[in-house]
Amino acid sequence: MSHFITVPINENGIIFDSDMNDVVKEAVLADPFRFEDIFVYSHGWSTDAYRAMDEYNRFSTDLAKRLLLIEAAAQPVLTAPPRNSLGVGIHWPSEITEDPQSALNNAQLFTFYAMEHRADAVGKNAVYSLLRLMLTARADSELRLRIFLLGHSFGCKVICAALHDLQTDIGNGTIQVPVSLSFRVVLLQPATDDDNLEPSDIYGHMVELNEIRLLITKSSEDKALNTWYPLASKIANLFHGDKARRALGATGPTGPTIAAFGGVDSVSVVAGFSVGDMLAHTAKLVVADLSPVHKYRENGKVYDGGFSGSHSDINFGEVYDMTIGFFYA
């Protein structure tokens, strides 16, 4: 990553720093920056500012380290290697309070409904605005612009809500786009309904984005999504008569979603999985099953997520290599 900034956002999706738009616009448009690769990260539920910074620093640093090792060895050969890049970390209030010592945090489990809707608000307002600003700033430029977006858990809702609304306005001519524009999106254990990407659902316009490719991970070892997500959603909709919903990161996408993307490449991520194992999977939609590597790490006592299982087990080599292979194949 050539440069990295963190954008603090309030519960309504409003960016705290009024000068942040000018900072992003200068980075995308002005010399000497003119970044060609933009990375946008969004964390999930129950993540305070300190933990968000830890997560972004760890993931971006480890990813960059792996990339440098690949470039030094010239193996495997990446067909679309990274160029000068800007990383943007989105921090949104996904806890009751930012104070990790507060007794109020004991009630965090009861905020499922509020936080999933807050994630959508953050995506539709703040992240959408940032992306729109980037595209508008480069609308008349011949310079390539690649936008890489990565979300975890409810952070995937942030990403998807922003992209859906972005494409809505691109489609109706409200937003002009650069000549060379592409999107690569990685949804790590997405805590959203398995049918939300269908054409008629809340993120259905994502599939229409220019040169978009989407990677979704799922895992049977993710207790948060396989066990608690359906229960929490059922309780949240107790008076609406809705049946329990299934999480995208538990089951993967539905048939209509796969059809909308023109098919799917399915990948099993096992222990020892590397960048080279990912390069052949070039479909518009890729679903990566992390169950094998999660089981391996659990059995080896490498990771024990307890209540949430392997839901947050995303910071290790196989996931980094999977992401690199998907982004730069």
Image (spheres, helix red, strand yellow):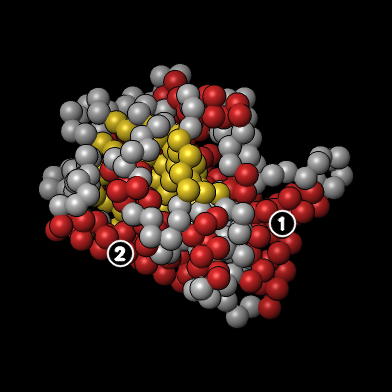
299 over 183 or under it: above or below: below
Can residue 326 be seen from the camera position used here? yes
**Mark 2: few, some, or many residues within 10 Å (few <14, many ≥20)?**
few
Contact (Cβ within 8 Å) of mark 2 with mark 1:
no
Mark carried by residue 51: none
Can residue 183 be seen from the camera position used here? no
Residues at marks 2 and 1, CA–CA distance in whole angstroms: 32 Å
Mark carried by residue 227: 1
Q: Amino acid at mark 2?
A: Thr
- Look at mark 2 in the image and give the residue it sits on: 61
In which quadrant will I find the C terminus?
Answer: top left
x then y, percent, for residue 146: 29, 38
At 70% from the left edge and 73% from the top edge, which residue is drawn?
Answer: 106
At 48% from the left edge and 32% from the top edge, which residue is drawn?
Answer: 264
x then y, percent, for residue 261: 48, 27
x then y, percent, for residue 155: 52, 52
Left or right: 92 in relation to 254: left
At 52% from the left edge and 57% from the top edge, which residue is drawn?
Answer: 292
